[in-house]
Amino acid sequence: MPIQEIILAYQGEMTLKGLNRGKFEAGLAKSIRHRLEELGPFKVHSAQSTVFIEPREEGLDMDEAFRRVSRVFGIVKISRAACCDKDFAAICDTAEAYLGQSLRSVRTFKVEAKRADKKYPMNSPEICRELGAYLLSRHNHLRVDVHNPQIEIMVEIRDHAAYVHGPKVEAAGGLPVGTSGRALNLLSGGIDSPVAAYCMARRGLALHHIHFASPPYTSLRAKLKVQALACELSEYIGDCVLFVVPYTKPQEYIRDHAPAPLFTVLMRRSMLRIANKVASKTGMEALITGESLAQVASQTMAALACTDAAQSLPVLRPLIGMDKSEIVAISRRIGTFETSIEPYEDCCTIFTPPHPKTKPTLAEIEAAEAKMPGLAELEQTAADEVEKIFIAIGQQPDF
Ligand code: ATP
Ligand code: MG
């Protein structure tokens, strides 16, 4: 008979949330249900800082369910467990069938037991001792190490059944998406901005993306690449919208009217003003960028101060204190790196002056903008004509 499995997801930091805990738990259960919808019917419920994810039918894809749940923010550890009859012989058989293979590759183990069913005829130390002895009789290379075992086998006796747990592994951490508010992420095709989105979603922000495209200077392939990145990120952040701004006209206008050394900062201010309009229309409370201090000329303290002054929403920059190598490591781990390094031009890399000013002052920036009377209208039109692309979890990008 095939082993009946469930998935156990252990809540992290949210267990510290006191009175708000209910909100965090509901957010987590919602994220998990949404991730699993496509795979078939699952029951999702929580008790004692653990979420139990049980298939309601036989034959559901538990490997894929496990992979998906391990990417849901709000969970620190995750494991699988085999369900069996509470009869002690059945527990021994299940432990052997489920974990025998793993026990063959280690030398030390330990059994832990937990009883929700207090009427069970054996107490926890007895279960540990008896199951330990049974497993030792089957694997005579093993020895028990209660302090530092290579494998810890957990048996749980609940009212309706018993469970033998597999090993616990690290999961996504953070807080459930949507429990910290909503923000708009400025997504370029580069390495940094997908990592920035990941970092902020991990802190519980629900987010959408905005991308600035300047055809014909930037190509359709460049836009599809950004769409592919948004699809990859949706595994972590859930369904979202990618807003694509037709940015050619404002960008040409700035090129034609700005002092060349100030071009990049003026353009970044313009992008943030448009992002503000889109965010405010859709109730988003902050903007996110992948900027990192001193990485390029537009990311010096002075340039960032000028960029910040362009609009009123908070600008979150989770990568501000990271080295490129750290950002790359996260990008590889979350799976966006390979797409990010595809070589397509971004609007931020066209018309860039040979000598951008690294210490612009707000006074000179505002003086330059005063000489660009037509810009506000072009920005408004770009915001009004934004294209909305819906990104759903599991969607295969056309790239
Ligand atoms: P990335 O690797 O994310 O492209 P970068 O180091 O190349 O970042 P910039 O090109 O200066 O830096 O951009 C800084 C940030 O501005 C990006 O991380 C992103 O948040 C935003 N950004 C840049 N270009 C675009 C774009 N075309 N659309 C939306 N946001 C953009
Ligand atoms: Mg870039």
Image (spheres, rainbow, N blue to C red):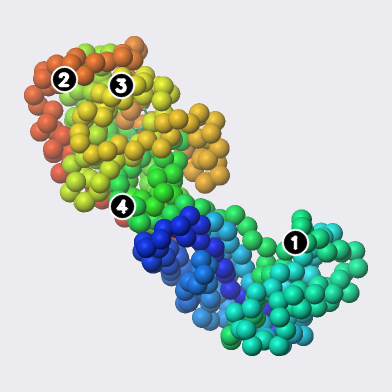
* Residue topped by disc 4: 181
* Residue topped by disc 1: 151
- In the image: residue 158, left or right of residue 220: right
SS for callout 1: strand
Choose mark 4 or mark 2, whichever is in front.
4
Residue 33 placement: quadrant: bottom left
Q: Residue 351, position in %: x, y?
A: 30, 21
Quarter placement of the N terminus:
bottom right
Q: How many marks?
A: 4
Sequence-first disc among 2 and 3: 3
SS for callout 3: helix
In space, the residues marked 4 and 2 are separated at their CA atoms by: 32 Å
Q: How crowded is mark 4: few (under 14 residues within 10 Å), some or many (20 or more)?
A: some
Q: Which amino acid does label 4 sit on?
A: Gly
Q: Which amino acid does label 2 sit on?
A: Glu
* Residue topped by disc 3: 303
Which residue occupies 58% across, 85% down? 159
Which residue occupies 57% across, 81% down? 58
Sequence-first disc among 4 and 2: 4
CB atoms at circles 4 and 3 under 8 Å apart? no
CB atoms at circles 2 and 3 under 8 Å apart? no
Viewer-closest of 66 and 39? 66
